[in-house]
Amino acid sequence: MYQNQLQETNIAIASVWRDSYQQIYYANAVIYGVEHSISLSDDDRNRIRGEALLVRSLLYFYLQQLFGDIPYTTSLDYENNRMIGKTKAAGVLTQLEKDVTEAVTLLEDDYRDAERIYPNRKAAQLLLARIYLFQEDWLSAEQIAKKIIQSPLYHYEADIDEVFHKSGRHILWQLKPQNSGDATSEGTHYYFANSAPPNYALTQDLVDAFADNDLRKQVWIATVTVNGQSWSRPYKYKNRENNTNEYSIIFRLEEVYFIMAETLARQNKVDEALPYLNASRERAGLTPLTSLSKEAFIDELLAEKRREFFTESGHRFLDLKRWGRLDDLTALKPDWKDYKQIWPLPQSELLMNPNLYPQNTGY
């Protein structure tokens, strides 16, 4: 997959599809249970439904981004789900806007756990702002982002060393490792030491995108040298044993700042947008940007967001796709073709459900 040699028989692609729809089914079951419960209080009913809607919507969001047109279902009828057809990608986003808007009305701002391992209203608002961004509804995205930034729950983390520690007030939502002391999945997934990388490393192009004095290059990237040859790997999550202070961050305030920066710039308010773009630069020890044209600002935003969110939730790929810039990958990715902006539908799913045809173009 990382070499862009995607095939409809790829088991990893099939696993993403299968596991996501299994969890969507669980979310639908939770929502059904809440709707038919006669013992839940109204507060519990709203909270559980809101959380399930948010989780389901996040799953659907990534499925839509990865596969394009996909089945959208709220049903628990297995036979119906097994033969359901696809909803157009734009239609999925429209439905997700409705679902997440409902989640926002159902959830509260207060967290039900101090470690922020359960989503709240502001987490739902962030996803809603992201959806508005993908719909190019700049004003709505700005309004939602402003509500999050103004919330007393959050504070922009000024210390680069603290960004991936679980106690940060810049964190909107994070996931706790399954067992006490476990490393985060990111901390193990990208790790290699004392040998060549078994699968993948950071590209030199990405490493070179950082100035030498950029603190993110110094703190978030590790270099491994073996027999005179060097590779770079992500080093955002550092604890591999006896982990006590790192959880996997799903949403952090920095994304809201970038949403705010982009929406203002898209509305020709570049001067207002600059502080939101400069926040991550100044934390990284870089000089703030000044007096940019709208086009130059957008280019800088894309470059800065790459440096801030590398190896986090696919931000870079989705941004390039959303902005029509995926051809930028031609010189960097082996075997890149434009049709690979979406994955093939898994062959195993097509064989079980002919209503999923046609296969995505190019596969």
Image: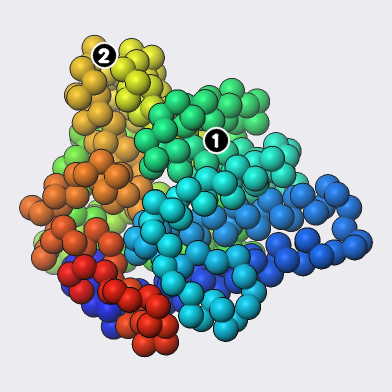
Task: Please name whichever residue, 166 or 172, is drawn nearer the observer in this view of the structure.
Answer: 172
Vertical order, 216 against 260 (above or below): below
Q: Earlier in the sequence, mark 1 or mark 2?
A: 1
Residue drawn where x is 89% and y is 53% of the image: 41
Q: Nearer the viewer, residue 236 or 338?
A: 338
Residue type indicated by callout 1? His
Considering only vertical position in the picture, is 227 above or below 302?
below
Q: What x and y, as percent, mark residue 311?
A: 35, 53
Distance between mark 1 and mark 2 Cα atoms: 25 Å
Which residue appears at 27% of the width and 79% of the height? 8
* Residue located at (64% from left, 65% from top): 27
Q: Position of residue 207 (x, y in %)?
A: 20, 46
Dot 1: element: loop
- According to the picture, the residue beneath numbered tag 1 turns out to be 170
Direction from residue 205 to residue 245 in the image, left or right: right
In the picture, the disc for residue 56 is none
Extreme left residue here? 331
Residue 218 in sight from this viewpoint: no
Name the residue carrying label 2. 290
The N terminus: image quadrant = bottom left
